[in-house]
Amino acid sequence: MCFRKTRYKGLCYEMPHFTTHLHDEAGTNALGAALARALLPGLAIHLHGDLGAGKTALTRALLHAAGHQGHVKSPTYTLVEPYTIQIAQQAVEVMHFDLYRMASPDEFLEAGFREYFNPDTICIVEWPEKADTALPPPDISVLLSVSDVSDKGRDVELQALSDKGSQCLARLKFAPNL
């Protein structure tokens, strides 16, 4: 973990920053489990990456590691799927958004999705750029990218963009399989 100055929507932050390479699905699952152990109520996590970069796979691993027993599906058509997990023996709602099919930021507002962004609910958002400024700012930004074809892994960068995001990344204990 290191600190670096990060610009987000015109503001400059000096916040924790974490990068790693995930060689395979097991690495993605391990990172999801590490994130699950570091979660705090009220976090907003934005997931960035092309189709197939692993946004839903990372979220699925996080939710299962946080105690969700059932199926975790991509909310591509429903736009949002709710889950309940336990953090410090307290039930916490997680809202998993996939905004890929949204045509404009107004759809985000019209659907009433902003109400989920509160101090008690964790919101994980795939394709946040589709909601643009209608979406509350993230505490953590996760950038996923597929590595070259010969490796078939993915590169991951986590950036804290708030005090709550910094607290979460400070709690993150992850050592990739090298």
Image (cartoon, rainbow, N blue to C red):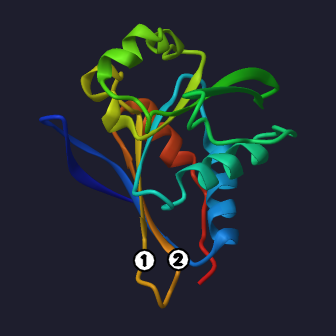
Please provide percent x and percent y for residue 26. Answer: 70, 70
Please provide percent x and percent y for residue 146. Answer: 44, 71
Question: Alpha-carbon distance for marks 1 and 2?
Answer: 5 Å
Does 147 appear above or below 6? below
The residue furthest bottom is 150
- The amino acid at mark 1 is Ser
The residue furthest left is 10
Q: Which mark is residue 25?
A: none
**Quarter of the figure that contains the N terminus:** bottom left
The residue at the point 48 percent across, 91 percent down is 150
Q: Nearer the viewer, residue 134 or 118?
A: 134
Horizontal placement of 19 versus 42: left or right? Answer: left
The residue at the point 62 percent across, 63 percent down is 28
The residue at the point 25 percent across, 23 percent down is 133
The residue furthest right is 69
The mark tally for this picture is 2
Asked if disc 1 and disc 2 are in contact, CB closer than 8 Å, the reply is yes
- Give the SS element for disc 1: loop
* Dot 1 or dot 2, earlier in sequence: 1
Q: Which residue is mark 1?
A: 147
Q: Which mark is residue 153?
A: 2
Q: Nearer the viewer, residue 29 or 159?
A: 29
**Quarter of the figure that contains the C terminus:** bottom right
Does 152 appear above or below 61? below
Does 79 appear above or below 161? above
Horizontal placement of 72 versus 151: left or right? Answer: right
Please provide percent x and percent y for residue 84. Answer: 76, 25
